[in-house]
Image: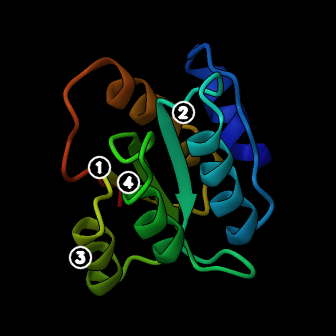
Amino acid sequence: MFLIQEAIEVSEVQLTVHVAKDGEQAVQFFDRVDGDSDMPCPALVILDINLPKKQGGDVLKHMRQSRKCSGALVLVVSTSDSAQDRERMAKLGADGYFRKPSAYDEFMKLGEIVKKLLNGPPLKEIDSPR
């Protein structure tokens, strides 16, 4: 999570970041948003596929069924470069997919992807550099 926050800061995107430590906590967050008329839905959800307690795909499916958050942008961030994972997340409604690179400089490009998603029309395929 530290590198994700750093990438966002480096790209100078002004965001309030809420962190869910596992998939179960993320699902509870969306349920709280749905139940509280004053609580806004996030503009963007950065979602890892491999979360403890509840997988990212399950979280995304739950979020897409949310009364208030179903239309939020979702950027999947994963170490997996599997075409099957990409296709599954796209079918569940992900707006982009970023494969976590091992090089720091490549990871920092995540901030620019976040900026593009927030400032423009949703993109259906966002790839990390190869």
Query: The disc labelled 3 sits on which kind of residue?
Result: Glu
Q: Earlier in the sequence, mark 4 or mark 1?
A: 1
Q: Which residue is drawn at 24% across and 22% down?
A: 120
Q: Tell me whether the residue at label 2 lies in contact with that at label 1, contact meaning CB atoms closer than 8 angstroms.
A: no
Relative horizontal placement of residue 64, taking residue 83 as reference (left or right): right
Q: Earlier in the sequence, mark 2 or mark 4?
A: 2
Q: Which of marks 3 and 2 is in front?
A: 2
Give the residue pinned by disc 2: 42
Q: Please say whether residue 92 is visible from this viewpoint.
A: yes
Q: How far apart are marks 3 and 1 (CA)?
A: 11 Å
Q: Tell me whether the residue at label 4 lies in contact with that at label 1, contact meaning CB atoms closer than 8 angstroms.
A: no
Relative horizontal placement of residue 75, taking residue 50 as reference (left or right): left
Query: The disc labelled 1 sits on which kind of residue?
Result: Asp
Q: Please say whether residue 109 is visible from this viewpoint.
A: no
Give the residue pinned by disc 3: 87
Q: Which of marks 3 and 1 is nearer the N terminus?
A: 3
Q: Nearer the viewer, mark 2 or mark 1?
A: 2
Q: Earlier in the sequence, mark 3 or mark 2?
A: 2
Q: Is mark 4 on a helix, strand or loop?
A: loop
Q: Tell me whether the residue at label 3 lies in contact with that at label 1, contact meaning CB atoms closer than 8 angstroms.
A: no
Q: Residue at x 38, y 54 (%)?
A: 128
Q: Residue at x 79, y 45 (%)?
A: 2
Q: Earlier in the sequence, mark 2 or mark 1?
A: 2
Of residue 103 and residue 122, the one placed in the foreground of this image is 122
